[in-house]
Amino acid sequence: MTNRLTASSAFYRYFPFAIFMCFIGFDEFICFLANQGFFKLELTTLYYLYPVKAMTVVFFLFLFRSHYYELKLKDFSNIPITLASCGVGLLVFALWIKMDWTFGAAGVPHGFNPELLPRRNVQIAMTLIRIAGAVLIVPLMEELFWRSFLIRYIIDKKFYTVPLGTFTWASFLFTIILFGLEHNFILAGIMAGIFYNLLLYKTRSLAQCVLAHAVTNLALAIFVVSTGKWQFW
C-alpha cells in the first residue's frame, strides 16, 4: 500500500485539522479584541460560526476520502474488539467528568450553551449540529491527524512507511501532551490521549480509535444536554 503514497499524503491528514484549529484561533482572536474594548460582542454571536466550521471540515474530509486507506470498516467485524473500543470510549467519558478540574485546567470555559440562543427552534438546531460535529466530524478529523499522521510522523518524516500502531516513547509522549494542550481541560485531554493511543497500539486500527472517540463524545453530549453542564462543551 505504501508504494502509492507520497509525502503529500500528510496534507490530507493535517489540513482538515488545521482548518478546524484556524476557526478556533479566529474565534479566540475575535473574543480577545472584544475583551480589549474594540467592539461589543454578544456571548452567543460566535456560536453561529460552528456550523460553518463543521461543514468546511466535512467538505475537505469528503474531498480527501479516497486517501484515507487506513480507515477500514471491516475492522468493526471483530465484535469483541469493537465492544472493547466502545468500552474505552465510555471509560474516557467517565474519567473526563469525574476528574479534578481545579488542577491543570486552562481556565473554566463558558462552553456552548444553546439555552442562551433566542428561539427554541434555533436552540434545537444548534444543539443537533453541535452533537453531530462532536460525534461524527471531530473524532474522524482528530484521529486522522493525531493517531494516523502525527504519531507516525514523529517516528519518521516518511510517516506512511511506519506501520499503524508502531510504538515509541517519543511519539507516545509528544502526542498525548499535545492532545491535552488542544483541550481546555489539559489533564483530561492527556488522559484521553493515553487511552486512544493504547487502543491504537492494541488494535492497530484507526477505525477503532475513531469509534472510541465518537462514543466518548456522544456520551459527553448526552451528559451535557441532560445536566446543563455546558462547560464540558
Image (spheres, grey):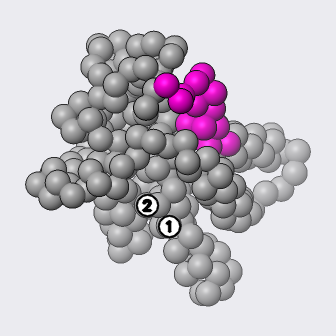
Q: Amino acid at mark 2?
A: Val
Q: Main secondary structure of the magenta part?
A: helix
Judge by depth and name the residue closer to the eye, 150 or 161: 161
Residue 110 in the image, given as x and y percentages of width and height: 54, 54
In the displayed orientation, state which residue is furthest to the left.
80
Find out whether residue 14 is within the magenta segment: yes
Residue 128 in the image, given as x and y percentages of width and height: 52, 74
Q: Is residue 52 above or below residue 64?
A: below
User: Which corner quadrant of the image does residue 185 belong to?
Assistant: top left
For the point 64% across and 81% down, which residue is it? Answer: 122
Residue 192 in the image, given as x and y percentages of width and height: 31, 39
- Give the structural element (helix, strand or loop) at label 2: helix
Residue 205 in the image, given as x and y percentages of width and height: 29, 41
Judge by depth and name the residue closer to the eye, 213 or 48: 213
Badge 1 is on which residue? 132
Left or right: residue 125 versus residue 149 is right
Q: Amino acid at mark 1?
A: Ala
For the point 56% across and 50% down, which residue is it? Answer: 65
Mark sitting on residue 79: none
On the rendered image, what quadrant is the N terminus found in?
top left
For the point 27% across and 19% down, which residue is it? Answer: 167
- Give the structural element (helix, strand or loop) at label 1: helix
Badge 2 is on which residue? 135
**CA distance for labels 2 and 1:** 5 Å
Question: Label 1 near label 2: C-beta < 8 Å?
Answer: yes
Q: Residues within 10 Å of mark 1 (few under 14, many from 20)?
A: some
Judge by depth and name the residue closer to the eye, 105 or 10: 10
User: Which corner quadrant of the image does residue 105 belong to?
Assistant: top left
For the point 63% across and 27% down, which residue is it? Answer: 8
Provide the residue span drawn in magenta: 3-19
Find out whether residue 125 is within the magenta segment: no
